[in-house]
Image: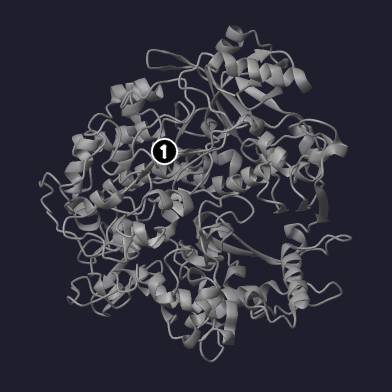
């Protein structure tokens, strides 16, 4: 199952394995708004209206439940289906599209009523870590949770809960999760799917029968997705819906199953693991909050002593602090926890752009991004850049973010006061390092050639920037300078340009024990300061002093799991939660699906992969009442990062917009919400409604068409790597849009002619590609047209054109602050767009027609 991804085009190297599976008899199904290169290789292709995936997946869940197709033994044993929820909980079916606890004033949820019966959060657990001032201490979730960091504030294992819940393994209790789930998705019928998604009942049935026939004890189905799911105002709930479906079918933790997050460029997975995010520390440790977490004990209290491996939070964090500050971090000074930054509000990238316009952000460093064409609402991004005092851009080529001032939105270049520093960057072929992408797989790349001229690696830049700052601060007695001066900052710079050692950085990330020797597993980390580790989930990547990420043993020389190709976090484990591949007794669900199992004679878990379970914990182990962390998990609790050891069909804590997925329309949609007419969009979505970022009213006649953006194989993200290359520019030379023959006839568009696409934010001109790959859909009783626009283009380089991202508004998922860029509404008209004052008047006229206030 490929949904939310054009796998063949955006991840072509990985797609070879899909083709190999198909050659061996696998069925490939593609669900997408467009017919793509992936569709061309699929056995079944299902067109879908962009932004309606939750309705489709919810329909599949309803089919599974009403037809009794769930893998019942797996569901009872390994999910929270049997858990009983407090009687205070009210569903969207009870409250017209809202869950209990919603506060309209703050557009956020108090999640107290979502808890398990008998397992309400302890005083310092669950929503407490991210609350604001002490006056809010009794509130779980809420406005600060939504604004400052969303669900990520809980770390990757979700929120802590006070105790294991009361359970009814008959699944008959009216408040057990299974019954709540059944009621919640009851209205997601094939007929509703047809009305909302434009998918015929016949196509829906084909998919439903295929996935249920290929799931259960003997077979498994895999789901693959990418940013086609994540970049929505309900993106987290898209993935949650698929997780629920896969858990019901018994497809999690088993070979051939799971949910594969396709991550294809620039170490995109590694950038969240280490990370480059405002609200997380390495290894998905939550960033401390400014108001409440004044010491290490308070910070860790939400997880320390809890069930599951997150109960070892103190060991993970103390080892990180020791990695940062070495001998300066001691038990007496709380391991310098007070030197960590604190969250005090919303500091996501888009909030920073608005801060530039408002004058509160004065400087900006851009490394490996091109927001002037690649950021949501790129026109607003450029306005922000024009209001800075200084801007540093590091890239391979002089991208639009460095040259935006040459074509200012309004006025003349000489009126732009931003001082721009362009620093040439080395490519990945010109430096050592690692990528972490799909499958959590670290793969090392070795420098092939020296970087030309003044080009330098990212490692060189940030290391020497830090070195120079430390030199300038040398001798300072100001306490605020101590965190920088005391940092461990020795990475063996060598050669003529002083290139730091990437392997030394990897060694710091891996961690070391009291004797200075490399650690081999995160279970060796301690909270007493005796271990150091820059990222606990990466501990073991340099076990025995060997760069495990650099291994490339051919597949023919090892087993089919290929454990000696690179290194997968954690512990080189290739399938997470693989204890679920065996039944409660530790026996494989079926011989043909054997993956890991309990060896009764050896008294250990064994198998084809590294067991995702304590090696010596038997299936019949039951914890004593006072057990904590992993010791509190039973021998049949495979989801070891969850507080109850189960896969969560219902999330009692940890999400900003609901414990269950709900179909809401995108922030901009030409269609009404057929499920909840009074609640069209995600009530917790983050929107910045302000000049330059106005939104279209639901169903506006001024913007009647759906637009979706996408990638091309020939170009990469904002285009800086590819639009300057003649071979790629020849293949995809200019910006274009894809429209159906019916829409072309309706709007007078000519194949290879010009079209102007208009939103409230901007208008762009693109060449027209009239193609049957874009299919009109029947949605809510009327024809719905969709327009596809690739987003790589800008004015620089050889392949040029207007940026599709100029059209977008900034609307964000409340959990992870990712933008809704895969669906918006627009108008399209033949001919080229105007410029200057005429463009501004065109946009203002559209806004007047739509009733959008200036």
- State which quarter of the image contains the N terminus: top left
Image coordinates for residue 594, horizontal then vertical, percent? 32, 61
- Compared across the picture, whether 697 is left or right of 177 comes to right
- Compared across the picture, whether 826 is left or right of 235 comes to right
- Compared across the picture, whether 551 is left or right of 626 comes to right
**Residue at image coords 51%, 86%:** 330
Q: Secondary structure at mark 1?
A: loop
- State which quarter of the image contains the C terminus: top right
Viewer-nearest residue: 131 or 605: 131
Above or below: residue 646 compared with residue 602: above
Image coordinates for residue 60, horizontal then vertical, percent? 30, 35
**Residue at image coords 60%, 49%:** 349
Q: Is residue 324 visible?
A: yes
- Compared across the picture, whether 113 is left or right of 334 comes to left
Residue density around tag 1, few if under 14, some if 14–19, many if 20 or more, within 10 Å: some
Which residue is the extreme one toward the bottom? 515
**Residue at image coords 55%, 56%:** 269
Viewer-nearest residue: 624 or 609: 624
Image coordinates for residue 404, horizontal then vertical, percent? 79, 39
Image coordinates for residue 645, horizontal then vertical, percent? 27, 63
Above or below: residue 793 compared with residue 501: above
* Colouring convention used in this rendered image of the protein: one colour
Above or below: residue 245 compared with residue 365: above
Judging by the rendered image, the residue that carries numbered circle 1 is 27
């Amino acid at each position: 199952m490929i949904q939310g991804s054009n796998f063949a085009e955006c991840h072509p190297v990985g797609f070879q394995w899909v083709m190999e599976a198909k050659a061996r008899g696998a069925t490939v199904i593609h669900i997408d708004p467009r017919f793509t290169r992936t569709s061309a290789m699929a056995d079944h292709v299902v067109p879908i209206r962009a932004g309606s995936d939750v309705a489709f997946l919810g329909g599949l869940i309803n089919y599974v439940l009403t037809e009794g197709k769930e893998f019942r033994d797996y569901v009872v044993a390994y999910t929270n289906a049997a858990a009983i929820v407090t009687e205070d909980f009210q569903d969207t079916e009870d409250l017209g599209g809202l869950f209990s606890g919603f506060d309209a004033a703050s557009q956020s949820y108090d999640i107290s009523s979502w808890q398990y019966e008998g397992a309400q959060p302890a005083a310092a657990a669950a929503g407490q870590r991210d609350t604001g001032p002490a006056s809010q201490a009794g509130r779980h979730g809420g406005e600060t949770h939504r604004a400052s960091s969303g669900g990520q504030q809980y770390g990757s294992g979700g929120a802590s809960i006070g105790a294991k819940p009361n359970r009814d393994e008959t699944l008959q209790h009216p408040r057990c999760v299974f019954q709540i789930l059944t009621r919640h998705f009851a209205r997601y019928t094939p007929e509703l799917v047809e009305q909302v998604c434009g998918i015929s009942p016949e196509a829906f049935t084909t998919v439903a029968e295929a996935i249920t026939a290929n799931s259960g004890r003997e077979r498994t189905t895999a789901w693959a997705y990418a940013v086609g799911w994540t970049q929505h105002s309900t993106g987290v709930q898209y993935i949650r819906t698929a997780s629920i479906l896969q858990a019901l079918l018994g497809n999690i933790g088993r070979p051939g199953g799971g949910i594969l997050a396709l991550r294809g460029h620039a170490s995109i997975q590694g950038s969240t693991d280490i990370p480059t995010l405002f609200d997380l520390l390495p290894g998905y440790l939550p960033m401390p909050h400014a108001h409440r977490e004044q010491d290490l004990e308070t910070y860790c209290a939400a997880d320390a002593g809890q069930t599951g491996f997150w109960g070892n939070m103190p060991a993970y964090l103390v080892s990180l602090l020791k990695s940062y500050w070495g001998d300066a971090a001691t038990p007496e000074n709380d391991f310098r926890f007070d030197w960590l930054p604190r969250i005090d509000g919303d500091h996501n990238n888009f909030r920073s752009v608005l801060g530039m316009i408002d004058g509160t952000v004065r400087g900006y460093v851009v490394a490996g991004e091109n927001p002037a064409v690649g950021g949501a609402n790129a026109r607003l991004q450029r306005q922000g850049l024009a209001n800075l005092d200084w801007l540093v851009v590091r890239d391979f080529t002089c991208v639009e973010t460095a040259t935006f001032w040459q074509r200012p939105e309004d006025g003349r270049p000489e009126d732009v006061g931003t001082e721009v520093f362009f620093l040439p960057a080395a490519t990945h072929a010109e430096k050592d390092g690692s990528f972490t992408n799909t499958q959590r797989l670290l793969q090392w790349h070795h420098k092939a050639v020296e970087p030309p001229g003044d080009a330098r690696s990212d490692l060189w830049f940030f290391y020497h920037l830090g070195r120079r700052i430390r030199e300038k601060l040398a001798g300072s007695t100001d306490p605020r300078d101590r965190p920088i001066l005391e940092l461990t900052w020795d990475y063996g710079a060598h050669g003529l340009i002083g290139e730091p050692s990437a392997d030394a950085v990897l060694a710091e990330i891996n961690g070391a024990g009291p004797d200075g020797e490399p650690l081999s597993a995160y279970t060796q980390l301690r909270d007493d300061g005796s271990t150091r580790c820059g990222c606990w989930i990466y501990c073991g990547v340099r076990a025995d002093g060997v760069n495990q990420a650099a291994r490339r043993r051919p597949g023919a020389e090892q087993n089919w799991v290929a454990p000696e190709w690179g290194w997968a976090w954690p512990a080189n484990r290739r399938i997470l939660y693989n204890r679920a591949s065996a039944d409660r007794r530790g026996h494989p669900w079926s011989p043909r699906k054997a993956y890991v199992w309990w060896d009764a004679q050896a008294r250990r878990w064994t198998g084809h992969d590294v067991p995702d379970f304590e090696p010596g914990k038997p299936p019949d182990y039951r914890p004593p009442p006072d057990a904590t962390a992993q010791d509190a998990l039973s021998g049949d609790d495979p989801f070891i990062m969850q507080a109850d050891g189960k896969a969560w069909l219902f999330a009692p804590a940890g999400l900003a917009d609901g414990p269950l997925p709900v179909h809401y329309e995108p922030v901009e949609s030409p269609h009404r919400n057929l499920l909840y007419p009074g609640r069209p969009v995600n009530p917790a979505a983050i929107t910045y409604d302000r000049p330059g970022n106005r939104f279209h009213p639901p169903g506006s006649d001024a913007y009647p068409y759906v637009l979706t953006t996408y990638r091309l194989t020939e170009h990469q993200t904002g285009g800086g790597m590819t639009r300057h290359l003649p071979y790629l520019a020849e293949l995809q030379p200019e910006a274009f849009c894809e429209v159906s023959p019916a829409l072309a006839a309706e709007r007078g568009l000519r194949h290879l002619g010009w079209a102007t696409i208009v939103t409230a934010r901007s208008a762009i001109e693109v060449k027209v590609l009239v193609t049957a790959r874009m299919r009109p859909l029947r949605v809510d009783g009327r024809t719905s047209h969709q327009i596809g626009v690739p987003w790589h283009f800008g004015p620089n380089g050889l392949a040029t054109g207007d940026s599709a991202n100029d059209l977008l508004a900034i609307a964000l998922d409340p959990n992870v602050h990712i933008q809704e860029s895969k669906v918006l509404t627009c108008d399209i008209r033949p001919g080229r767009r105007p410029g200057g004052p005429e463009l501004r008047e065109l946009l203002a006229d559209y806004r007047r027609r739509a009733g959008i206030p200036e």
